[in-house]
Amino acid sequence: MDVVSPHKETVRLRLALIVGALLICGFMWADIVLLPDNLHDTYFFNRLYFQVPTIVLVVGLSYAPFFYAKRHWIFTLLMVVLTLSNFGLIHQSWIEANFAFPYEGTILYAFYCVFALGIPFKLALLAALINVIGFVLLMVVSPVYGERVMISSAFVAGSLFICVYAKYRLDRVMELLVSSNKKLAKLSRIDSLTNLLNRRALMQRSEALLSLSIRQSLDFAVIMLDLDDFKKYNDAFGHQKGDDVIVMQADLMREIFKRQTDVLGRYGGEEFMVVVSGLTRKQVYSKCEQMSMLWQSRSIAHADTATHRWVTCSIGIACMEKGKGTSLEALIQTADKALYEAKSAGKNTIKLESYANP
């Protein structure tokens, strides 16, 4: 799922706020027809000198550096302020003209702030509770709706509950969607058995590191690793044990190649690849020796027909010095050739070749 940038989201929210202010102005033409003449000043003051300026203030805040991080709290406060100001208008209308001003604005403010401005569930619940309490207190102080006070309170509370519950469901669906997308993204680049990069992701990351190394004139190396006589081990001990050995190879690689820039992946089957930058030939070779010693220290018994008594791996290295550019494919071919020579030399061997441009 695409991630919207903070700047674009802020622009969208700013436009939503402006639309909200225009809607309030639009409703004024409908409301003014219902109001007694002696309430016009009170009504215009509430709408034009309080509610609209409050929204304009929030639009101004949208240009502040802290706005995006605090936007949910700002919109929650806006929802409460607009709603309470509407309660104030209802109260004043009752006191000044014994007029029952409609309460539906309470619900419209809630739905607009929660869904158009994106107030999350917990804050929406907090705002709804404050607004319900405020409405109940309003009905105690000013029983505007007479015998319909109870049903009006129930309607406001029910509507706000529906609003909040719908937001909860929407947020939950979005959380599940984001979680699923993250899992799918991981599956698309991570080998499920070893938790190393799969071949496609390995090639992408390696290409990026090679480009950076060439630009910065850094040494660069491709290391191919292959478990010796793996098929014989599989045949002798079964696929589960074979998987265990493959996982161990990945763990040993992580133990040795642990810089953030090191790229580790499963190239295919029992063959692995490591790509490193900024290490000399001697340093790369030394790390590969550590790999061989770690396998020896594990002393995992091999099949009787295997070349060596214990499980081992052969390693082929292709080095490129000081960013003297070539393609990743060419380096892999050179490392594969070195790996083949290591296998031919009796396995459990390290072979290093420096790549030279043709």
Image (cartoon, rainbow, N blue to C red):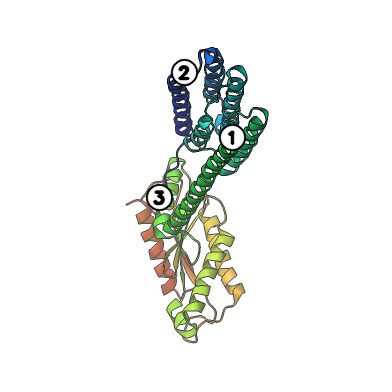
Of the numbered discs 2 and 1, the one sitting upstream in the chain is: 2
Residue 354: in sight, yes or no? no
Mark number displayed over residue 32: 2
Give percent across and percent down for residue 271. 43, 67
Q: Residue at x 42, y 67 (%)?
A: 339
The image quadrant that residue 46 belongs to is: top right
Task: Say left or right for 217 vs 150.
Answer: left
Q: Residues within 10 Å of mark 2 (few under 14, many from 20)?
A: some
Q: CA distance from mark 2 to mark 1?
A: 25 Å
Can you identify the residue that label 1 sits on? 147
- Looking at the rendered structure, the kind of residue marked 3 is Glu
Judge by depth and name the residue closer to the eye, 196 or 163: 163
Picture layout, residue 164 above or below residue 225: above
Label 3, secondary structure: give it.
Answer: helix
Judge by depth and name the residue closer to the eye, 126 or 209: 126
Give percent across and percent down for residue 61. 56, 24
